[in-house]
Amino acid sequence: MSFKVLLLDGVDPVCANIFKERGIQADQPIKLSPEELNSQISNYDGMVVRSATTVTPELLEKATNMKVIGRAGVGVDNIDIKAATTKGILVMNTPDGNTISTAEHTCGMIIALARNIPTSVATVKNGGWDRKKYMGSEVFGKKLGIVGLGKIGSEVAKRMQSFGMEVFAYDPFTTKEHASDMNIELVDIDELLGNVDFLSVHTPLTEKTKGLVSLKNADKLKKGIRLVNCARGGIYEEADLPKLIDDGIVGGVALDVYSQEPPNEELYKVLEHPGIICTPHLGASTEE
């Protein structure tokens, strides 16, 4: 009996071709409901997911033949690692797969925030013309704070240094040598929040990173700081963002990830705020 793999979340068809070239049966349904997934998962030895599918202990209980789960991306927080390990299922990710694409998207978000690109585009398309209203700021000479100086964070730093930004970082897991080699100053999190003009996060969502920026710690933020999140939804307290902007504490927000995807009605109302730029989790969505 051949090894069977289930490909979910719109994984690129090239993935199926790679498996088939190696004699592995790869099934790629257009879409499975949770009920359909529960009923079919026992037929497969492996599966590949992106971020849309949540691999829960309940699902794994039904995956009686599962041997390996591949995450087409970096983060594995949508997979219950403990439950998988208990059942002897290997969980693998692709840490370099979306490094460049996510870093580039982050840099685009920074520039879009600095120059009010999305709102000014919408104005012109609607027949408006107001150059004064959309006065932006240069990123040259500004301070960029990065939380998480891993692969993606480091690539963002290199690119924005080319724009003339001064980069600071908080990462308890990196070394001073790594930061020094990149001409980046490591600081503690409170100093970072209170010192930088732009903040970009590149960490998993954990108890320590959840709600990293919220109304509760607004007094720690540099006035007018601009926030970017292309990592994991929930690192910024989404419900607090409109008030932080309206109060002048935060100068603008750019989000590519959300605590719930797609957003629910309540979250969509948050995203309607003109000071928030939002894209539908496109960090890894490039042809490459």
Image (spheres, rainbow, N blue to C red):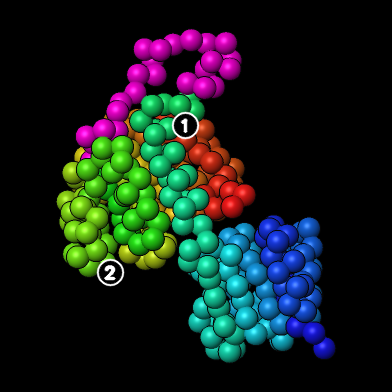
| Left or right placement of residue 190 versus residue 263 in this view | left
In this view, the residue in front, 79 or 1, is 1
Question: Residue 163, position in %: x, y?
Answer: 31, 37
Tag in front: 1 or 2: 2
Q: What residue is shown with label 2?
A: 173
Give above or below for 142 relative to 283: above
Image position, residue 234 (x, y; %):
44, 54
The residue type indicated by label 2 comes to Phe
Residue 249 is situated, as x and y percent measured from the top left of the image, at: 27, 35
- Horizontal side of 75 relative to 142 (left or right) equals right
Q: What residue type is labelled 1?
A: His
Number of marks = 2
**Residue 124 part of the magenta segment:** yes
Residue bearing mark 1: 273
Instruction: Tell me which residue sits at (77%, 72%) in the image.
Output: 20
Boundaries of the magenta span: 120-143
Look at the magenta stretch and give its main secondary structure.
Answer: loop
